[in-house]
Amino acid sequence: MATHLFFDFFGTLVDYSPSRTEQGYERSFALLREAGARLDYGEFLSLWSEVAEGFEAEAERTRREFSMVELGRAFLARVPGAPPVEGAEELVRVYVEEWNQGVTYLDGVVPLLERLSRRFPLAVITNTHDHHLVPAHLERMGAARFFERVITSVELGTRKPAVEIFAHAVRAGGAAAADCVHVGDSYHADYRGALAAGLRPLLIDPQRRAPVPDGHRIASVLEVESRL
């Protein structure tokens, strides 16, 4: 019998685009140009993507999470004519606002969470580079009140699938790992990570692409209730 229920956020409780180009980053680019940066819009997107991909590769190798401000500073250090790297906070703030245009809320999720919160303590375990981002979305969704805690990789300093982030959630909830269910959409980060930490994983896999038992697979987060 499950006693605690954990959720991934992006791709699980909300749909999102991970793209660093398709949302449109005109305001971020304008901010750079006004500060004296000498590059065009295509060069801006290309360089930002290059720096971000380097950070991502290192984080995947080490499981150490990075912050958006760290990324912003590394980016500014490579932009000709850019403002000092200490000014990265404003660039990151605007960039995250524009990236958020790719986040959409799913019908039925908030009522689902309300029902589940009557039965289980709920928590979010999410990889993110900005510790304000997920709590702010939960507030806008009207779902923040259903969660006892939001555990972010950037605050903990380590990212899924590291066992440590799941173990931290289990300890914080005063639970036993085997009694915790974790729901996520990533086979690598969510499913394999939770399994390695001794939790019971449910993988959102509507295309049935991942090599998991059928009892561990759901088509959407809205199926969680029936599985419990």
Image (cartoon, rainbow, N blue to C red):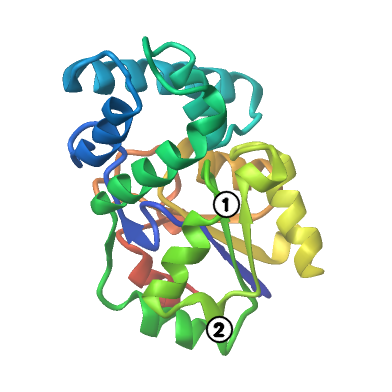
Looking at the image, is 223 positioned above or below residue 99?
below
Measuring from the top left, give residue 170's x and y in whole percent: 75, 60
Q: Which residue is mark 1?
A: 131
Looking at the image, is 224 positioned above or below residue 77?
below
Query: Which-is-in-front pick, marks 2 and 1?
Result: 1
Return the mark for residue 210: none
- The residue that appears at 47% across and 86% down in the rendered structure is 114
Measuring from the top left, give residue 123's x and y in whole percent: 61, 67
What is the spatial separation of the Cα atoms under label 2 and label 1, in whole angstroms?
A: 23 Å
Looking at the image, is 153 positioned above or below residue 145?
above
Looking at the image, is 140 positioned above or below residue 45?
below
For the residue carrying disc 2, how many other residues have a C-alpha within 10 Å: few (<14), some (14-19), or many (20+)?
some
Who is closer to the viewer here, 151 or 12?
Answer: 151
Q: Quadrant location of the N terminus?
A: bottom right
Who is closer to the viewer here, 102 or 92?
Answer: 92
Return the mark for residue 117: 2
For the residue carrying disc 1, how many other residues have a C-alpha within 10 Å: few (<14), some (14-19), or many (20+)?
some
Measuring from the top left, give residue 68's x and y in whole percent: 51, 36
